[in-house]
Amino acid sequence: MTAATGTAVPEASRHASAAADVLIRLADDDLLTGHVLTSVAGWGPELEINIALSSMGQDEIGHARRLYALVTADPDEAERLVYERPAADFRAAPLARTYPARWELLLARQFLYETADAARAAVLVRTPHADIGALMSEMAHEESYHLDFWTTWLRTTTTRSVAARDRVQRAFGLMWPLALASFLPEFPDAAAEALGLPGGALAQAQQEWISATCAACAELGIALGGGEPDPGLDRLDAMLDEMRYVYRTAPGRW
Amino acid sequence: MTTSAQVKDEQAIQQVEPWQDLSEDYRNAATRMIEFHMMSEVIGPVHEFRWVPRAPSLHAKLVFAAKSQDEVGHGLMLMRVCEDLTGRTRAQYIEQILDGPPRFMNIFHYPWDEWVDPAIVAWLIDGAEIERQATLLRSSYGPYARAMRKILKEEGFHHHCGRYLIEQMMAGTPDQRAAVQRGVERWWLRTVAMFGPRDENSKHGPKLMAYGLKLAGNEALRQSWLTKFVPQIRAMGVEIPDDNLSRDEETGQWTYTEPDWAEFSSLLRGGSPVGAELQRELRSARGLNSWLLEED
Amino acid sequence: MPMLRTFEVFRQKAPGDAHVHVGEVEAPDAAAAIVLAKEHFARREVCCSLWVADRADVLRSQWEPEVFDSGRAKAYRRSRGIRASEAVS
């Protein structure tokens, strides 16, 4: 994947490709998360919750669009990144590839997704690349609501009953290994350098996020432990098939 | 808000609230009408959410997600109106929707098998709802009239959403234009029927009008919709599949091929396989998560 | 004991405005209610603040309209107004 000629990274930079890679990783994560939330909004636990799921999903799709736009100035190319890029070229991390139907799994996925997003964004916002920093600042507003939503509903759900808490515990058992494997970009040092960030800043943010998340969950009686990421939870292919159904079966001007 | 539909002029009926001393007859009439509207808005999204994940562009995805989200919001507002009117709880109403008799609009009893289906529904039928709901802003049942304000604003957006999606297709390939034409042929009579039978053939209409719950007759609303939409459909480049459709120059009244009223009646009273499937799907989804908000 | 409680929602358009009642959401508690209220009542509307209040804490008046009317009928509570020419200089 060659770096695009967008405004985000100067073309001549030897780090151009590494920065674009991170931006596409973040965009892909938000695209899939937005797809999950706007899709499951039809099937959630209650009407009020479903409305909120859709809003948050729309926010994430909006973020994805803006992130893709930092990589390519051509809106048609951005659409093709979504509707035509081979699955193998997606950079979404393991957590973002999950597509939960059950509330407890969605809850665990989103709590971990949003807390990690916030922790990473706090580092990324320090980049000297003005447009990336500005986008991180703007997205933080919507993200602060997302974090409030999932933090609130984690508490509400786990305090419902012992059985409810046990469900949530099992869900975190599945999602936590995926979240751990998802925090850092694929090549964190190259990414930090490309984005003008202090070396080791992302790794430090990860450590702090692990501590804070374990503490927050422990307070609710949820233990975050070991376990290997389950590749069976990767639903990227199914998500892309869904996303591209009309695009493929009824091609035309869209 | 102007409408060419005949609207009950005199506001002899003052708006009432659920805690007032309303007659059982009034309550029953209001309950029946509003529960039907509510169930339509809760069941309808089952169709919509089959298509939200499949929108063919990011803009369409956002617009269609927002539209479908609004419908869930309409279901919620009407659900609250029903709960306060009858005293039934959310849990009881959800059970009624999932397991009870199918009491919702005819349009949801048909399959929505192609992307063009939700687009046409948004364009023509949400467009029709704008007419109807404008008259309901003055419904005698206060909470319902208040809910209509927010609902009506959003229907405007839905109509434009549908119109945008159809415009995209009509400006596209021959296959896309053909899909729209076929879609309108499928949906035409269903939409004409959606307004319901003429007042003289309507079982509940006269009572609803007398109570001021409803302020315009079915035929008046249908005529108003034809006046607005026949030119719009033709301007879109679509042929209307009704050779009998014509407008009297002097009176402005439309004549049209009657929909199959027996079919309409049968759908509203007895349901359909498509309708049953909607309830089944919703039951299955709700079943996965019912533990979260189950009553103690 | 139902899990869901009804919360009345009040929305403030802009700083300085009153919070106005806009409807209800149902939720297990107030914190859950307010995150739900934001997306149901403020996703398009101009809003800078929301309140939610448990319906159980809201008391509805029981007086007939005439009881309220009698207050308005008390003419002595209203100033007749004063012409500029009458103003005490």
Image (tube, rainbow, N blue to C red):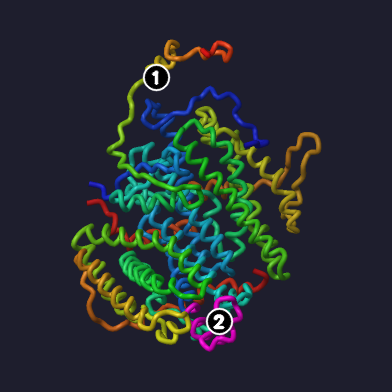
Report the quarter where the N terminus of chain B lies: top right
**Chain ID of residue with mark 1:** C
Q: Is residue A116 above or below residue A38?
A: below
| CA–CA distance in space, label 1 to label 2 | 68 Å
Query: Which callout, 1 or 2, points to the residue nearer the camera?
Result: 1
Give the residue at x 26% y 60%: A155
Q: Are marks 1 and 2 on the same chain?
A: no
Provide the residue designation for mark 2.
Answer: A85
Q: Nearer the viewer, residue A144 or B219?
A: A144
Give the residue at x 37% y 54%: C35
Q: Position of residue A145 (x, y in %)?
A: 39, 59
Q: Is residue A213 above or below residue B90?
A: below
Residue B77, numbered label: none
Provide the residue designation for mark 1.
Answer: C68
Give the residue at x 39% y 46%: C50
Quick check: C35 left or right of B243? left
Quick check: B72 left or right of A79? left
Q: Nearer the viewer, residue C20 or B175?
A: C20
Which residue type does callout 2 highlight? Answer: Arg
Q: Is residue B39 among the parts visible in the rendering? A: no
**Chain ID of residue with mark 2:** A
Q: Position of residue A167 (x, y in %)?
A: 25, 67
Which residue type does callout 1 highlight? Answer: Phe
Q: Position of residue A181 (x, y in %)?
A: 34, 81
Residue segment shown in magenta: A1-24
